[in-house]
Image (tube, helix red, strand yellow):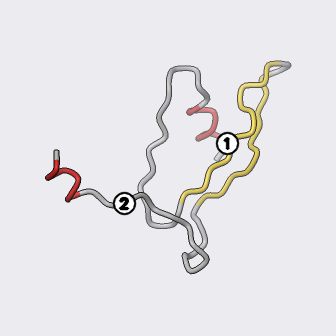
Amino acid sequence: MAALRRLGHPPAMITPESPSPSIRVSALRHRYGSKEVLTGVDLTIPAGTVFGYIGPNGAGKSTTVKIL
């Protein structure tokens, strides 16, 4: 386990000196008819990073990615 931690990188942080993010979303909402399926999604992905978007079935992952 310690070997895996040494190989990993710390989470990316956006700082004032960082380049602009590749993706920035604020308060994303989406409806299918009268059913609201996404409510207030905030997401910032720094440029040059690999991002995993995981969650349970029906959480809105595919809907979010299709919108992006």
User: Residue 9 falls in which quadrant of the image?
Assistant: bottom left
Viewer-side residue, 28 vs 13:
13
**SS type, badge 2:** loop
Of circles 1 and 2, which is in front? 2
Query: What residue is shown with label 2?
Result: 10
Horizontal arrangement in the rendering, residue 39 relative to residue 21 (left or right): right
Q: Which of marks 1 and 2 is nearer the N terminus?
A: 2
Identity, as a three-letter code, of the amino acid under mark 1: Ile
Left or right: 40, with 47 as reference point:
right
Q: Position of residue 34 (x, y in %)?
A: 85, 19
Q: What element carries label 1?
A: helix
Rendered-image quadrant of the N terminus: top left
Residue 42's label in the rendered image is none
- Asked if 67 appears above or below 19 in the picture, the reply is above
Identify the disc placed on residue 67: 1
Name the outermost residue toward the front.
2
Determine whether, in the image, residue 26 is placed left or right of residue 21: right
The crowding category of the residue bearing disc 2, from other C-alpha atoms within 10 Å (few below 14, some 14 to 19, many at least 20), is few
Residue 64: image x %, image y %?
63, 38
Name which residue type carries label 2.
Pro
Whether residues under marks 1 and 2 lie with C-beta atoms below 8 angstroms apart, the answer is no
**30 or 46: which is nearer to us?**
46
- Give the vertical position of 30 relative to 7 (above or below): above
Estimate the x, y position of residue 35 in percent, counting from the top left. 79, 19
Q: Residue 45: percent from the left, percent from the top?
A: 55, 57
| Along the viewing direction, whichever of 5 and 55 lies nearer the viewer | 5
Mark-to-mark CA distance, 1 and 2 = 28 Å
Q: Is residue 37 above or below residue 44?
A: above
